[in-house]
């Protein structure tokens, strides 16, 4: 069973059905498809079972969030290669066939990315994940018109978590007490953390431009007005803002060595000052609301 697919869903809109529909048309069909269902809607599992009887569905009694959901799926997956998907992704019919070629470059390729476009198939979402100077995830080509400027395959730092193809052997080598994906992350930065840990273990990531997928950026958690918009931060609630900030720091603390931290201290500091300024200007109400909630919580104990 060469390829397993793990999809995480919260049951938003019609995303899961469209994603599964694109998988059913693959020229290289996966050996198994698993859906980790965080929708808390019992009827969703029944509906998917009727439409796609071969799909394995694992309903959760609570929202496990993205990292823990992937860990659940990865622990059950039997494939040598595992494709992890957001439910708001639609794959070109040749995606798996083309993306698998990335693993054939050499046996140290542990991560493969295709060309990920926005829902309109004209704007680039990601052609590979890179580590920025300010220690954030930089998606190559993000938000740019696809004019064929990223048609050459080659090595990259890591892969976007929405459409992430992994070698199972690589995942086993980076697994620790928090899982394949760090369950403390819930969502955001879990893909950069896995990519960074893989690099430190000697694994490489590879980009295959002929493997094409379309992704509704923020489809599972943004309001409609924020779908596929370039700046995610303005559409996040206070809890998601907290996860975004916390997980960046956690990624740095886990993976950065002291020398590189010193080399990148200035850009990191500048970035953090800009983030703090943004929060104070645009998110002050949410910050105060959470502050008083925490005060009330501690006073009631």
Image (tube, grey):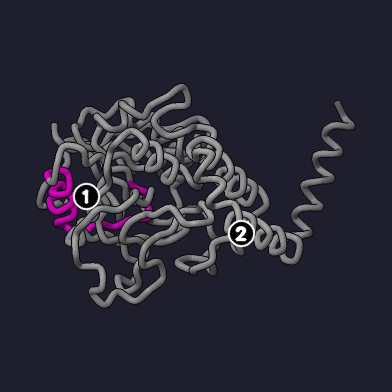
Say few, some or many: other residues with alpha carbon within 10 Å of mark 2 (under 14 / 14 to 19 / 20 or more).
Answer: some
Examine the structure image and report whether residue 90 is included in the region drawn in magenta.
yes
Q: CA distance from mark 1 to mark 2?
A: 39 Å
Q: Going by the image, does 192 lie left or right of 105?
A: right
Residues 217 and 278: in front is 278
Task: Name the foreground residue: 225 vs 108.
Answer: 108
- Residue 182, percent across and down? 47, 33
- Badge 1: few (under 14), some or many (20 or more) residues near its Cα, within 10 Å? many
Q: Is residue 10 left or right of residue 240?
A: left
- State whether residue 111 is above or below residue 93: above
Q: Nearer the viewer, mark 1 or mark 2?
A: 2
| Disc 2 secondary structure class | helix
Q: Compared to 286, does 182 lie above or below?
A: above
Q: Residue at x 54, y 33 (%)?
A: 184
> To which quarter of the image does residue 176 belong?
top left
Label 1, secondary structure: give it.
Answer: helix
State the residue at coordinates (41%, 70%): 143
Q: Magenta stretch? A: 85-104
Taking the spot 51% from the left edge, 51% from the top edge, the residue there is 135
198, above or below 238, in the image: above
User: Is residue 226 shown left or right of residue 9?
Assistant: right
Image quarter of the N terminus: top left
Can residue 120 be seen at all in this image of the molecule? yes
Judged left or right of residue 293, residue 232 is left
State yes or no: residue 123 in magenta. Answer: no
Q: Earlier in the sequence, mark 1 or mark 2?
A: 1
- Residue 76 sits in quarter: top left
Q: Label for residue 271?
A: 2
Label ID, residue 23: 1
């Amino acid at each position: 069973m060469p390829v397993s697919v793990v999809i995480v869903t919260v049951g938003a809109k019609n995303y899961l059905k469209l994603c599964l529909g694109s998988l059913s048309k693959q020229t290289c069909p996966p050996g198994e498809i698993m859906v980790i269902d965080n929708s808390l809607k019992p009827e969703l599992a029944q509906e998917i079972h009727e439409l796609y009887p071969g799909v394995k569905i694992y309903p959760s009694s609570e929202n496990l969030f993205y990292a823990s959901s992937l860990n659940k799926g990865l622990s059950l997956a039997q494939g040598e290669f595992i494709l992890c998907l957001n439910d708001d992704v639609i794959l070109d019919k040749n995606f798996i066939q083309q993306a698998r070629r990335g693993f054939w470059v050499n046996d140290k390729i542990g991560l493969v990315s295709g060309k990920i476009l926005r829902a309109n198939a004209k704007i680039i979402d990601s052609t590979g994940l890179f580590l920025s100077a300010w220690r954030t995830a930089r998606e190559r080509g993000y938000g740019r018109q696809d004019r064929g400027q990223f048609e050459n395959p080659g090595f990259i730092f890591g892969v976007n978590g929405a459409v992430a193809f992994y070698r199972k052997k690589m995942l086993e080598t980076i697994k620790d007490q928090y899982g394949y994906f760090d369950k403390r992350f819930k969502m955001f930065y879990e893909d950069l953390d896995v990519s960074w840990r893989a690099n430190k273990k000697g694994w490489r990531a590879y980009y295959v431009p002929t493997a094409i997928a379309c992704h509704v950026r923020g489809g599972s958690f943004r309001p409609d007005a924020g779908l596929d918009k370039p700046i995610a931060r303005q559409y996040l609630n206070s809890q998601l803002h907290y996860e975004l900030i916390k997980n960046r720091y956690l990624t740095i603390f886990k993976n950065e060595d002291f020398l590189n931290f010193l080399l990148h201290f200035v850009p990191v500091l500048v970035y953090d000052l800009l983030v703090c300024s943004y929060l104070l200007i645009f998110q002050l109400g949410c910050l105060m609301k959470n502050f008083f909630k925490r005060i009330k919580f501690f006073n009631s104990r």
